[in-house]
Image (cartoon, rainbow, N blue to C red):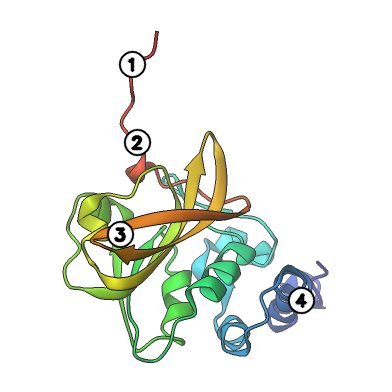
Amino acid sequence: MTITAERPGTVDFAAARRAMIDSQLRPSGVNDPAVLEAFASVAREDFVPAAARGHAYIDRAIPLGDGQALAAPLFHGRMLTEAAPVADDRVLVVTGGSGYLAALAKLLAGSVTVITAADAAAGKAKGRFSLVLVDGAIEQLPDSLSARLEDAGRLVTGLVERGVTRLAIGRKAAGAVALLPLAEMGIPVLAEFAAPKRWSF
């Protein structure tokens, strides 16, 4: 991706945002007009540390410190495309630390509630939601979080299986959420949702 500088040392963020959409999102199947408009409207550089602003639009995750990261644009783009938020959706965003996904979702859905990964894993989410977005890859989905999803509600997350991260989707039916892995991609792992360690011989 080419980043255009207005003058030495200054990044043209508007141009970088357009390049992200045209070179990362569109070629990878993210073409929903509402989703692309959200990406065009939210300044990704505002969600990273000051030292990382110059490369806020690269096609990989950006470390935020304390084990947290802002996922690559493609993960959020594919996630929102699969989720297809609409105006009457009540969305719960389990944040990976940046707040960027929540800012995008607020432009697409009727209401958005944000909870940290630690609080979500600890069962502190309240209310009922038609859509849950988990901003990172999980090894297991706690029952306490799936309980926040209303019947026929959707969940989109990253999923860790044998060390490989994939985008995954699910829908609640008969009180349970079964996750279907989709595309393999690099996704920051949320340690709060690690599966319990098992003894092996």
Amino acid type of the residue that numbered disc 1 sits on in the rendered structure: Trp
194 vs 120: above or below? above
Q: Residue furthest front?
A: 174
Mark 3 or 2: in front is 2
Query: From mark 4 to mark 1, how far is it between C-alphas?
Result: 48 Å
Q: CA distance from mark 4 to mark 2?
A: 38 Å
The residue lying toward the viewer, choosing from 187 and 164, is 164
Which label belongs to residue 199?
1
Instruction: Classify residue 188 as left or right of residue 53.
Output: left
Q: Nearer the viewer, mark 4 or mark 1?
A: 1
Kind of residue sitting beneath label 4: Ala
Q: Which residue is mark 4?
A: 19
Kindly identify which residue carries mark 2. 195
Q: CA distance from mark 4 to mark 3?
A: 30 Å
Q: Which of the marked residues, 4 or 3, is nearer the chain's N terminus? A: 4
Direction from residue 33 to residue 189 in the image, left or right: left
The amino acid at mark 3 is Thr
Q: Position of residue 1 (x, y in %)?
A: 81, 66
Report crowding for label 4: few under 14, some 14 to 19, many 20 or more residues within 10 A (C-alpha): some
Give whichever of discs 4 and 2 has the lower sequence position: 4
Which mark is drawn over residue 116?
3
Q: Is label 4 or label 2 in front?
A: 2
Task: Say which label, 1 or 3, has the lower sequence index.
Answer: 3
